[in-house]
Image: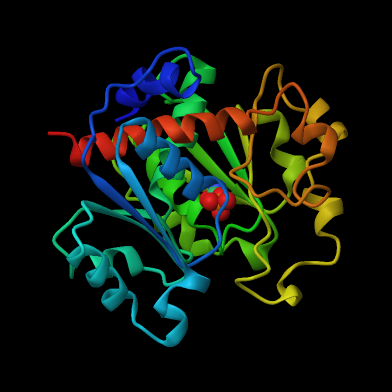
């Protein structure tokens, strides 16, 4: 899929035009939680491939009248949509829908569970930066609100599959020990460890991924009062990273909390490259499922 995404990149960058591989297909975006990047990215990806895109958003759908997730999805499928792209606040919601409809379901982020296309676009961005698909021996720090993060979970699968060693960094309240057992220990797979002191790990890291504090998923009491002092990636901390170590963030960013303006917009930031890659990854995912 990442090879396909790489092939689609010139289309995303406006250098070439895509073949209308999905002409005549209808892709329905069922977004019951807010989104900027993922929804627009799926829409652009489907549109570039010639598909028709239908958007159903939480506030304007009958879910606001109490309709269940499965009923909403089943009705869209019954109208002849060819695929459903689902974002919802229920962990496992995309799988639940997939169990009840006969069309492909793409998980665009389900609660605190998974965000697979984000994991893939992050992996693609890291592989492009390092110039290799083999991440064995590379140490990736994922920093922040790990407990709430579907992005962290999907990245654990993606990165360790490619051999990277992941260190999850954050205050004890936001980095549960259970995260070390999300992925299996097996030959060729990278490891998962936990650290609570960002400054102690900075100089051994090859890639840094900062995550958003998700106040909508837990109370503010969970965030230590000294969070910014201990975990915000600022210019001083960046100066202690190795030469060329890149900085990622899935967005949306809380500037001044996870990282400062100068770091978010600085030369090491791959944040907008992640967004560009996201369209290419979603083109690859949609094509893989729907192109004849
Ligand atoms: N990264 C991400 O999922 O962003 P959105 O919530 O804006 O889609």
Q: Position of residue 146 (x, y in %)?
A: 58, 57
Is 224 placed above or below 283 here? below
Pick the residue in front: 203 or 151: 151
Picture quarter with the N terminus: top left
Pick the residue in front: 61 or 290: 61
Is 147 placed above or below 15 here? below
Q: Position of residue 92 (x, y in %)?
A: 34, 68
Q: Dividing the picture into quarters, in which one does residue 162 lie? A: top left
Is 184 placed above or below 267 here? below
* Residue found 74% across the figure and 74% down from its top: 220
Q: Dividing the picture into quarters, in which one does residue 86 lie? A: bottom left
Picture quarter with the C terminus: top left
* Residue found 74% across the figure and 41% down from its top: 200
* Residue found 63% across the figure and 33% down from its top: 271
Q: Position of residue 227 (x, y in %)?
A: 80, 58
Is 47 placed above or below 106 here? above
Q: Would you say 288 lies left or right of 247 here? A: left
Q: Dividing the picture into quarters, in which one does residue 196 lie? A: bottom right
């Amino acid at each position: 899929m990442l090879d396909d995404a790489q092939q689609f990149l010139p289309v995303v960058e406006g250098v070439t035009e895509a073949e209308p591989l999905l002409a005549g297909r209808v892709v329905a975006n069922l977004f019951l939680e807010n989104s900027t990047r993922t929804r627009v990215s799926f829409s652009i990806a489907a549109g570039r491939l010639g598909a028709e895109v239908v958007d159903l958003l939480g506030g304007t759908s009958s879910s606001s009248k109490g309709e269940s997730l499965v009923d909403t999805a089943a009705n869209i499928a019954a109208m002849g949509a060819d695929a459903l792209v689902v974002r919802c606040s229920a962990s496992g919601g995309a799988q639940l829908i997939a169990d009840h409809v006969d069309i492909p379901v793409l998980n665009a982020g389900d609660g605190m569970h998974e965000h697979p296309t984000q994991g893939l676009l992050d992996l693609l961005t890291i592989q492009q930066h390092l110039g290799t698909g083999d991440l064995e021996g590379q140490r990736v720090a994922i920093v922040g609100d790990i407990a709430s993060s579907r992005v962290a979970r999907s990245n654990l699968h993606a990165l360790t599959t490619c051999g990277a060693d992941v260190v999850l960094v954050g205050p004890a309240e936001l980095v549960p020990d259970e995260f070390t057992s999300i992925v299996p220990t097996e030959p060729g797979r990278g490891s998962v460890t936990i650290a609570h002191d960002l400054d102690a790990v900075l100089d051994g890291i090859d890639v840094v991924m900062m995550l958003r504090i998700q106040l909508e998923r837990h109370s503010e009491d969970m965030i230590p009062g000294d969070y910014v002092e201990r975990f915000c990636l600022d210019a001083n901390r960046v100066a202690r990273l190795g030469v060329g170590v890149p900085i990622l963030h899935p967005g949306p960013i809380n500037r001044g909390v996870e990282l400062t303006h100068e770091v978010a917009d600085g030369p090491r930031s791959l944040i907008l490259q992640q967004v560009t890659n996201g369209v290419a990854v979603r083109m690859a995912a949609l094509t893989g499922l729907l192109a004849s």
